[in-house]
Amino acid sequence: MKNRKLKFRIFVVAIISTIAILIIFLSRQYIIHQAELRMQDVMLEAQSLHQYVQLEMHPAMYKYKEENRMPQEFYAPEILSSSYITRHVFHIFNEVRKENGLPLVEYRMASKNPRNKINQANDYEARLLDMFNADSTLKEHTEILAENGVNYLLYAKPFLRIEPRCLSCHGSRENAPQELAGYYKWESGFNLEVCTIPAIEIIKSPLVAENKASVFIIGFIIIGFAILLLLIFVNGKLSKKNEIIATQKDEMQTTLTKLTTTQAKLIETEKLASLGTLTAGVAHEINNPLNYIMGGYVGLLRYFQKHPEFEDKKNQMLLDSIKQGVDKVSGIVKGLNLYARENQSNNETCVVHNILDNCILMLNNQIKHRIEIEKEYASGNFCVNGNVGKLHQAILNILSNAVQSIENMGRINIVTKRVKSRGIIKISDTGKGIPPEFLSKVTDPFFTTKPPGKGTGLGLSITLSIIKDIGGELQFESEPGKGTTVIIDIPVVQQVKKQKSKDLKNN
């Protein structure tokens, strides 16, 4: 009897310890992820400074020199070097953070061949730079470093990739502006090659707040489980102990799953809500200049109609180009407005073919020149009862996955048909496919085959939820190396006549 009690207690301790470790791990990962997002925001601010200097200040300087409003030999890094300005802005930024008791944020521009020798890369930074140059698909690198007993979060991105226009200043010294070559007497910063990454930007900050939060979470969990263990071990009856442990274990596992899923979905929902607000605003702002363009087009058209002596094929071709461009932008704006709708009801009439065409149009920038879209729509359009914005989101998630699975050239085939009271949508791609062992997990929350930082694993989970909410089903068929087919089976509420609409075919 004593051995049974001992084994039972050991089993209980093992279960509780496993759950505690899992909670600590997930909490730590979430805290680190939030820190990474803050670092990305800081890096975006640094890149904005660079772009302002390069796109606004440099052209202004050359213009003033051409207008003789500035000496031709003038060059001052304090107002013309983006790396100099960004470095000193971060110095001031850290002074303010220090005054407010906040941890410092270290900023570094590192290069093997820097124009300013203060940016000379050390061995570690040189390895990071080689890593970015070796893999052109690598856009960022995040790492936790331990220095002098302190953990630091390091975030690195390529500064830029050398283009032919960069060689006007970074090519040979002989071809560089005299004032630039005169200021930098050495060879560093010149003789760069096209398509290489000459430098990386690095932001590093101590994980002080994150470590405090981790300690608090660990302490809270230890105290909570200590109380739980005390309650379990003072219980006199083994049967009651088993019942309490089993119940608490199930409740904790369920709560942990619900909390983690709800937390991630809340974050995703907040992001989508912000995106919807931003999208609606952008669409509204685009409509205003679009009306101006359309008014100009109508005015030109009437002018040429009144003055046939100016009419020729070239003028008509130019007018047709303007009209085609306005129609294209109008279609995009319409799709954005539908995607950004804030209506949460599931009682809207959703025209399936229109939604498919809107989603294709919104992905046009990722599709054109490399992916062929084949559409085999049913002879009559059909509708479902649901939420227009959410159905856009579901279709867009599936099409985005299809586009991302095609690494180079490929094809996406979209087939719709109606079988009695059901509507069938098949979206097939020629991408890399899904391994059989992952096929049953693709709609699980947080499951993703993408690299860290590239996906949350919630896209298809949310898509499945949207389809189920309108009484539909979602199926997947895939073969590695040959592609994937997603089948959406949804209830049709009415048949609609085929509408005349703008050409939304893939360009």
Image (cartoon, rainbow, N blue to C red):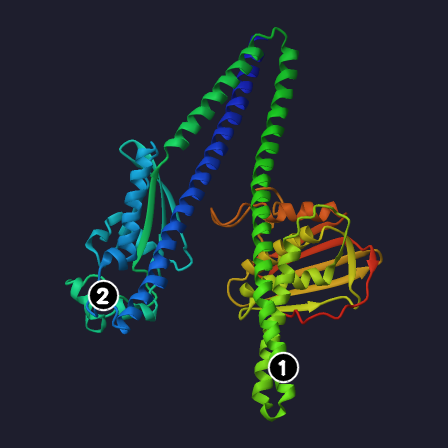
Locate the N terminus and report the quarter of the image it occupies.
top right
| Amino acid of disc 1 | Leu
Mark 2 to mark 1 CA distance (whole Å):
53 Å
Task: Using the rendered view, name the quadrant where residue 177 is placed.
Answer: bottom left
Relative to residue 445, is residue 454 depicted above or below?
Answer: below
Q: Earlier in the sequence, mark 2 or mark 1?
A: 2
Going by the image, does 268 lie left or right of 147? Answer: right
Residue 407: image x %, image y %? Answer: 51, 62
Reading the image, the residue beneath label 2 is 190
Q: Quadrant of the C terminus?
A: bottom right
Q: Tag 1, which secondary structure?
A: helix
Q: Answer above or below: position of 335 versus 108.
A: below
SS state under label 2: loop
**Residue 95 in picture, x, y percent from top left:** 29, 39
Residues 161 and 165: in front is 165
Amino acid type for the residue under numbered disc 2: Phe
Task: Nearest to the eye among marks 2 and 1: give it.
Answer: 1
Q: Is residue 492 left or right of residue 38?
A: right
Task: Please tell me which residue lies in front, 253 or 150.
Answer: 150
Residue 302 in the image: state x and y as whole percent: 64, 82
Callout 1: few (<14), some (14-19), or many (20+) C-alpha neighbours within 10 Å?
some
